[in-house]
Amino acid sequence: MIRPPTLTSVGAVGQDAVPPIGPSYVTGSILAAGHDVCAIDAVGEALDQYTLLAGYENVLVHGLTDEEIVARIPKNIDVIGVSSMFSVEWPITRRVIDAIRLGFPKALIVLGGEHATASPEFSLTSCEGVDVAVLGEGEETIVELLDAFSKDGDFSLVAGIVYRDNQTCIRTGPRNRVKAIDTIPAPSWDLWPVEKYIDRELTHGVNLGRCMPILASRGCPYQCTFCSSPQMWTTMWNARDPKDVIREMKLYIEKYNASNFDFYDLTAIVKKSWIVEFCHLLESENLKITWQLPSGTRSEAIDEEVAELLYRSGCRSMNYAPETGSVEELKRIKKRCDLGRMLTSIRGSHCAGIQIKVNFVFGMPGQTWNDVRQTFKFFTKLAWVGVDDIACFPFSPYPGSELFLQLSEKGAVSLDEEYFISLMGYTDIPKSISYADAISSRQLVWLNITGMMFFYGVSMVLRPWRFFNLVFGLLFKRNSSKLTMAMANTRRKRQALKLFKQSGSSTVQIAPQ
């Protein structure tokens, strides 16, 4: 099982090096089914290595090179699984697969993840090295696929895949989601260099200590038009037994000395009764840990009572994601969100002591300048109620989303390499591309920048001490906020760019952070 290197750019502010929880779950299921499996994490095994992507300036490959990945694969391997979570990484993932196919011409190469689910036929036709694409949840599918491969190689009865038969792509019947998610085998972290991520404080959230990733639920019951989740996970939301989640946390405390947990859930807090039970149980354990929700959550289940429970149980950081402050735009993108209720929820969470970040997206199709004005007004309200950070991102039309399909039908996007590279604009604001007729790409760049400047300006006027906290964090590299962590991230990539120019080499090692 291979987690390929990630693609990033010098100006990208997102964290691209975090433990691969999806592949870890898949390898756990493979082991539980009795198969032998080994893992290669191209990022975790080369956290300080960057390579310039051939043909592009300032586009960096983070992790092992193609040759280094192939050299690590055992010679007697039968099946090679490749994780393909984010479409922006498809150009490098395809190169890795091409290199693997040259080195292992007889191996079965299986692709899985969100990109594979959104564009399976494209993945097979654009990369001849791929034999099978797994759609959606992969744990049950990969085990059935391996069983079929070990018997007669007939994949026609394996639900939830697209496979190659000569030059034809054949899609089998859909696979039902796993309802009893407590029965899914645990992640096999022993196969992955998770301790390297922990020791280097590489986390999806804010830096609160020795951090382990964890999942308490799967899926999301909503159908936002910009999101590919409905195609990957359907709209079924399932939560694990709170006791089982806490058992896993205790295991990581004992095994890895974990002191903080990042919940990677798509939508963690949907059901109030679940989160209340979880918090009460976690509080009673007195584990002396912290935890956070960096992927975003819903406001409906979080009132003052829940917020206080969250804090008492160790929750210290949480993201909300309204995407816009315009009621009209919320309707257009099918984002079921009551902004007034969200403000009340945020105020309660802030008063409880939880660090709050709120995410926004500019440049979506149909967005107007009135939508922008309403969003800026909402920024002021967020600063007033005490939000710590916001992030303004340019819209990226991801395969599998409703908006991508609409833009594709109009000919505004097509699945070529330039399109995949353009998806970097999501975290590299100067590379923003606007899909809103009323807003140009240049205007979108400034809109994202001025949006964040406006919020932080208002926030620091209302709470002047935050300015000094920010300066302290930058001077002493205390990465306790998303803003300081993002700036530290870009510094490392600028170091790599400087080394490229000094050494003349296309692959460099930078000093560990």
Image (cartoon, helix red, strand yellow):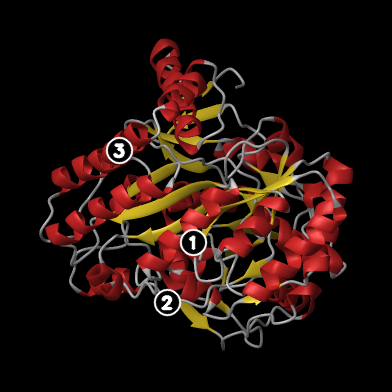
Q: Residue furthest top?
A: 502
Residue sitting at 60 percent across and 58 percent down? 307
> Mark 1 vs mark 2: which is more N-terminal?
2
In front of the other: 445 or 302: 302
Decide: marks 3, 1 in contact (CB < 8 A)?
no
Q: Nearer the viewer, mark 2 or mark 3?
A: 3
Residue 278 percent coordinates (x, y): 74, 65
Categorize mark 1 by other alpha carbons within 10 Å: few (<14), some (14-19), many (20+): many
Q: Amino acid at mark 3?
A: Val
Q: Amino acid at mark 1?
A: Ser
Above or below, comparing residue 475 to residue 117 in the picture? above
- Do we see residue 417 in this rendering? no
- Tell me, for residue 458, which label it has, or none: 3
Q: Amino acid at mark 2?
A: Gln
In front of the other: 64 or 440: 440
Residue denoted by label 2: 223
Categorize mark 2 by other alpha carbons within 10 Å: few (<14), some (14-19), many (20+): some
The residues bearing labels 3 and 1 have C-alpha atoms spaced at a distance of 20 Å
Where does the C terminus fall, quadrant-wise? top right
Residue denoted by label 1: 345
The residues bearing labels 2 and 3 have C-alpha atoms spaced at a distance of 33 Å
The residues bearing labels 1 and 2 have C-alpha atoms spaced at a distance of 22 Å
> Mark 3 vs mark 1: which is more N-terminal?
1
Q: Secondary structure at mark 1?
A: helix
Q: Secondary structure at mark 3?
A: helix
Q: With 77 as the anchor, is 70 left or right in this view?
A: left
Q: Secondary structure at mark 2?
A: loop
Residue 238 percent coordinates (x, y): 65, 77
Residue 132 percent coordinates (x, y): 58, 70
Where does the N terminus fall, quadrant-wise? bottom right
Residue sitting at 75 percent across and 69 percent down? 277
